[in-house]
Amino acid sequence: MQAGSKLKYFQLNKFKMKKKIFLSALLISGVLCVLAQSPGLNKGSAGEFKGGVRIQKTQKLYWENGVSFDFASSKIADSRIHFGVSYVTSRLGSAMASNAIKQDNYIISAGYHFRHQKKLQPFARLNTGYFHADYEEEIFDVLPNSAVLLSLDAGLSYEFSIPLTATLSAGYNLNSGNGTAGPGTLYPFYYQMSIFYTIFK
């Protein structure tokens, strides 16, 4: 009984930690948005902030969906470098109404955009963050269920005439798992599509 209470306490703390990370990312995004809309500050800084949805598919495994934010500034490499924060989860994909494993990805990224003044921009990106899989049953507690994310992806970004941007890319997880050394559902290859709305420019 005592062991069960400790397990519930540990799981509750992990949930609170994930919630804090996600809320922190949203808070940072909100602060950037408010600052950009301030006339006094906006005159001294040029930047572009976008928010939207991300759809991700791991090769031979799950669909994962979530939210993504992107920021670039003309004062940082003339808007060639983009910084991003994303949260994608199988809870909004393959794990909905199925017994697929519920897993969460908290991602921060930095990417370099080529042809940055054109509508079609090839890009390369470095991503890091935190991965967690919820196996739910206590019998699986001996298996690794979390890992530091480190991945590379490359693709194309297209800016429409309206304030929408679409990105497509293919990526590779450098620290994928096999179930004994790292989570077994952290596969190496994945594909993603994001649709962004330009919140300010």
Image (tube, rainbow, N blue to C red):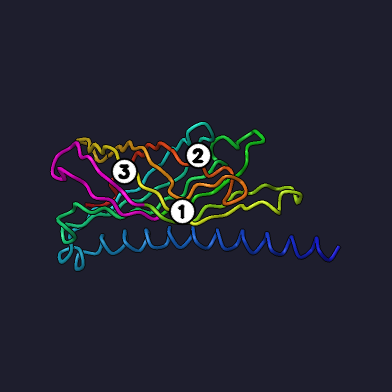
**Where does the N terminus fall, quadrant-wise?**
bottom right
Q: Where is residue 108 in the image (x, y as percent from the top left)?
A: 39, 55
Q: Is residue 33 above or below residue 163?
A: below
Left or right relative to 11: residue 30: left
Q: Residue at x 35, y 63 (%)?
A: 31
Q: What kind of element bears circle 1?
A: strand
Q: Which residue is drawn at 54% across and 49% down?
A: 104
Query: Of circles 1 and 2, which is in front?
Result: 1
Going by the numbered disc 2, the residue's amino acid type is Glu
Identify the image quadrant of residue 194: top left
Going by the numbered disc 1, the residue's amino acid type is Leu
Q: Does the magenta-highlighted stretch encompass residue 114?
A: yes
Q: Residue at x 19, y 68 (%)?
A: 40
- State how far apart marks 1 and 2 are (Cα): 15 Å
Instruction: List the residue tagged with mark 3.
Output: 197
Q: How crowded is mark 2: few (under 14 residues within 10 Å), some or many (20 or more)?
A: many
Segment colored magenta: 108-126
Query: Of circles 3 and 1, which is in front?
Result: 1
Q: Where is residue 83 in the image (x, y as percent from the top left)?
A: 30, 55
Q: Where is residue 175 in the image (x, y as percent from the top left)?
A: 47, 50
- CB under 8 Å between callouts 1 and 2? no
Q: Does the magenta-highlighted stretch encompass residue 115?
A: yes
Is tag 3's residue or tag 1's residue first in the polypeptide sequence? 1
Q: Position of residue 196 (x, y in %)?
A: 33, 42
Left or right relative to 171: residue 21: right
Identify the image quadrant of residue 75: bottom left
What number is the disc on residue 64?
2
Is tag 1's residue or tag 2's residue first in the polypeptide sequence? 2
- State how far apart marks 3 and 2 are (Cα): 20 Å
Going by the numbered disc 3, the residue's amino acid type is Tyr
Is tag 3's residue or tag 2's residue first in the polypeptide sequence? 2
Instruction: List the residue tagged with mark 1.
Output: 149
